[in-house]
Each structure stands twice: as C-alpha cells, then as structure tokens.
Image: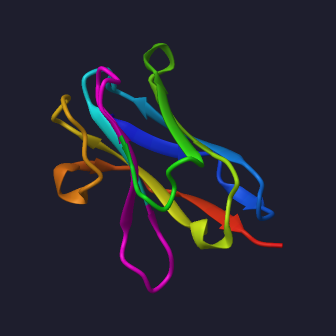
Amino acid sequence: QAQLVESGGGLVQPGGSLRLSCTASGFTLDYYAIGWFRQAPGKEREGVSCISGNERSIDYADSVKGRFTISRDNAKNTVYLQMNSLKPEDTGLYYCATDPRSGTCTTWEGRYDHWGRGTQVTVSS
C-alpha cells in the first residue's frame, strides 16, 4: 500500500542542523511535486518549502530562506529538507505531502492530497 513517511527529526540546539527525509513506498515520487509543512501547538500549519517533479520549481517560506534547502533523490524515492541555523521558532511537527501537479510548485497546502504523519523537530537550548 502507498505510504509517505517522514524521518530525521529530533532535538537540536539553536544554530544546529537537521536533515529531514520524506520517503515514499508503494508508489514513485518522480512526477509529484513535494511540499514540506510544519505546525506548532496552537498555531496553524504553514508551508515551509516545495519542489516540483522536475526540480525546476522550488520555493521557500520567507522565514526559512537562506537557511533551509530542499532537494530530491528519485533513485531513493526520497525528498530531503536540509535545515541549518535552526531557531527555536522552527520547532514543530514537520510533514511532507504530495501535489499531483508536477509543474510549478507552491507551499499552499490546498494543492496537496496525500500526507505523511510527521516528524517532530524541537530547537531548544
């Protein structure tokens, strides 16, 4: 059965780094745009980054530009989110999701139709 699983979260100090992975099983990610989203307790879920199927379209939320990098390795059926210079406000449950539109990507969650269960990222000293 098709599954989308996030991994790589954990507890890090401010200024530290984490690399999140989003791996698909039961289907191929090649022709899907992938988005990363996060949600902190009591706050709305927000788009963090996205990457199109052909990698020609990439976008980031203003709050993470210059610090986060999204990439994909289709041979491993995986999309990554490299997070550097982490701040306490980056804390949250991070989700990846698929967008059946393979062209220009967006961080608007209304475009996404399949979601993983999330991986927790906590940035604290």
Q: Nearer the viewer, residue 60 or 23?
A: 60
Residue shown at 71% from the left, 67% from the top: 123
Residue shown at 18% from the left, 50% from the top: 111
Q: Position of residue 5 (x, y in %)?
A: 48, 43
Q: Quadrant of residue 62?
A: bottom left
Q: Quadrant of residue 117?
A: bottom left
Q: Is residue 113 magenta?
A: no
Q: Is residue 66 left or right of residue 125?
A: left
Q: Is residue 28 left or right of residue 79?
A: left
The answer to whether residue 94 is seen in the rendering is yes
Range of the magenta residues? 38-58
Q: As displayed, is residue 12 above or below residue 49? A: below
For the N terminus, the image quarter is top left
For the C terminus, the image quarter is bottom right
Residue shown at 18% from the left, 58% from the top: 110
Q: Is residue 79 left or right of residue 17?
A: left
Q: Nearer the viewer, residue 65 or 118?
A: 65
Q: As displayed, is residue 87 above or below residue 51? A: below
* Residue found at the very far top of the displayed protein: 75
Task: Count the marks.
Answer: 0
Q: Position of residue 90 (x, y in %)?
A: 59, 66
Q: Position of residue 20 (x, y in %)?
A: 59, 44
Q: Nearer the viewer, residue 23 or 48?
A: 48
